[in-house]
Image (cartoon, rainbow, N blue to C red):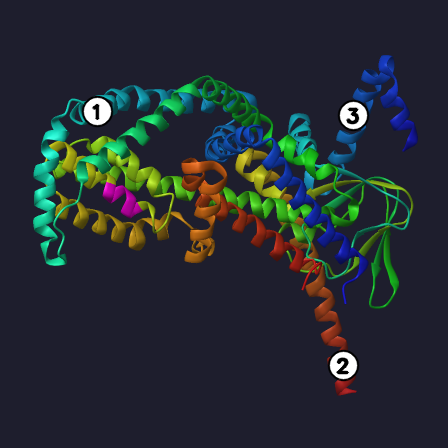
Amino acid sequence: MEDIEQQDSSFIWGNFFKRDREKDILTLLRNVPIFEGLSRSDLKAVERILHRRKYHAGEYIFRESDPGLGMYIIERGEVSIVAESRSAEITRLYQGDFFGEMALFNERPRNASAVAYEDTKLFGFFQPDLFGLLETRPRIGVKVVAKLARILAERLYKANQTNARIMAELARKDIS
Amino acid sequence: MMTNTKILIVLLLLIIAAVLALTVYTIGGIVSIFLVAMLFAFIITPAVDYLESHGVPRALASTIMFLFSLGAFAIIVYFLSPLVYDQVVVLQQRVSFGEMRKSIPQLESELVEYLSFLGVRELHLTAKIEELIFTLFDNLLNIASGLVGLVIFIVMTLISTFFLLKDGRKLKKSLIEIVPNQFFEMSMSILHKIDWSLGAYLRGILLDAFVIGTVTTFAMWLLDVPNYVLIGLVAAFANLVPYLGPPTAALVASSISVISLSTFAQVPLILVTFVLIRLLDDSIVQPLTISQSVKLHPLTIIFAILIGGQLFGILGMLFAVPIAGVVKVVASEMYEGLKRYRAVY
């Protein structure tokens, strides 16, 4: 993280490194499933509306039951997703992973907390940004929404399968 | 009991409110340039967004819409100003060339006759009207002396409007960037909702004023009331002030008719027309243009007008209610946002 800041401060090399950093960011975004298939210029437009945030180790990104406003993509660092009710870590996320995408569609309370496990840099992508993108750059906005819909449909399909399996198991136990 | 975070938020809000109040009080002129520019930007932004959605780059879209708005304004002024100017000149001639003075005794006798059931014998109209006109022209002279300031104000407002149109989103993003992580999502949510509600409210009151101004102009033209364009303009601006504005506009229209025609003949019809326009506004235009959630209590309106008048004179009175509306929108969205994030209960 620090090396990037040092590069920024160099007047002579700043521009070269800036271009490198921009390339890194675009590569990172291209690998995020909701931005898959976007062209370089589309990705640049998306990058312009993302919010870059820095979190120190142990700092909350959001808390369980807070209204959700959008999703985060990890640029650097690690994020721990924690169920506060059980005081247990659900999962650990790394560079390029994303979380909180459900909140892009509704402001339902978050069902877990997100905590920076180490010093972390994130990109925030929020509901107002998504709606803004749909209004001002509908071609890109529709692509992003379609990807999001596919991800959520996939998750719903898996949840339904799990649900069906659990129901079947419960029924079998009832019979036996 | 309040947690430290909540105390911090309340303190922060109080500090922000105090700093804003102090800033407006000390550098009110400069702040007003920014506020007016924001108002224009709020109105024009949807059009810029529309162009951008059709592939026009933001900077070009802002330039096009800025020039288009400026052009539309110039065309309106170009076509309306001779009409208004002619009507004002005619009115002024009637007032200053003694024609009105000649007709005052006749008007006075008409009025005394109307009011005879109240036991009125004499009204001393000539002296009272002369005093009123003297004060009015004195005020006009004051306005003329501030013309240079006005030109600077307009130029600065136009420049600020253009940059707010072009870089408004970047500015908002930069503003959000400085918010600490702890309050980041909450601030973003509140700012977005304020942005949305405020835009809708401002576009609503302006559309309402435009519709009422146009309808009034057309109605006065149909009734053959002189200076109908001037009356329409007055009605549009007066519409910004609920309760007091429309009766004031009706009074202005009646006065113009009486001064121009030296008779009260048109007054009842003018008053009935204004009542009908009021009904049209309350039942159809306002529900379509202005959100009911920003309806202000009559007491709030009266106090807002009094405070506006005390601080900034007639202009303050005119814009007091829209500003009170803006404050209500901002405050209620902030409160709702803080409640959603359980920062307040």
Residue type at mark 2 is: Arg
Q: Secondary structure at mark 2?
A: helix
Q: Secondary structure at mark 1?
A: helix
Q: Position of residue A137 (x, y in %)?
A: 56, 33
Q: Nearer the viewer, residue B32 or B123?
A: B123
Question: Image point 51% across, 24% down: which residue?
Answer: B157
Q: Quadrant of the N terminus of chain B?
A: bottom right
Question: Image point 68% across, 28% down: which residue?
Answer: A44
Marked residue nearer the N-terminal end (3 or 2): 3
Q: Is residue B216 left or right of residue B75?
A: left
Q: Is residue B102 left or right of residue B285?
A: left
Residue that protrudes farthest toward the top in the picture: A12
Disc 3 to disc 1, C-alpha distance: 70 Å
Q: Position of residue B234 (x, y in %)?
A: 29, 36
Residue range (magenta): B246-251
Of badges 3 and 1, the one in the foreground is 1
Above or below, B269 against B336 in this view is above
Question: Label 1, on which residue?
Answer: B92
Magenta segment includes A24: no
Question: Label 2, on which residue?
Answer: A172
Does residue A36 appear in the picture of this structure? Answer: no
Q: Is residue B267 left or right of residue A46?
A: left
Residue type at mark 1 is: Gln
Count neighbours of disc 2 (C-alpha within 10 A) and say few if under 14, some if 14 to 19, many if 20 or more: few
Question: Label 3, on which residue?
Answer: A23
Question: Image point 38% across, 45% down: which residue?
Answer: B241
Question: Pointer 3 indicates a residue of which chain?
Answer: A
Q: Position of residue B145 (x, y in %)?
A: 42, 19
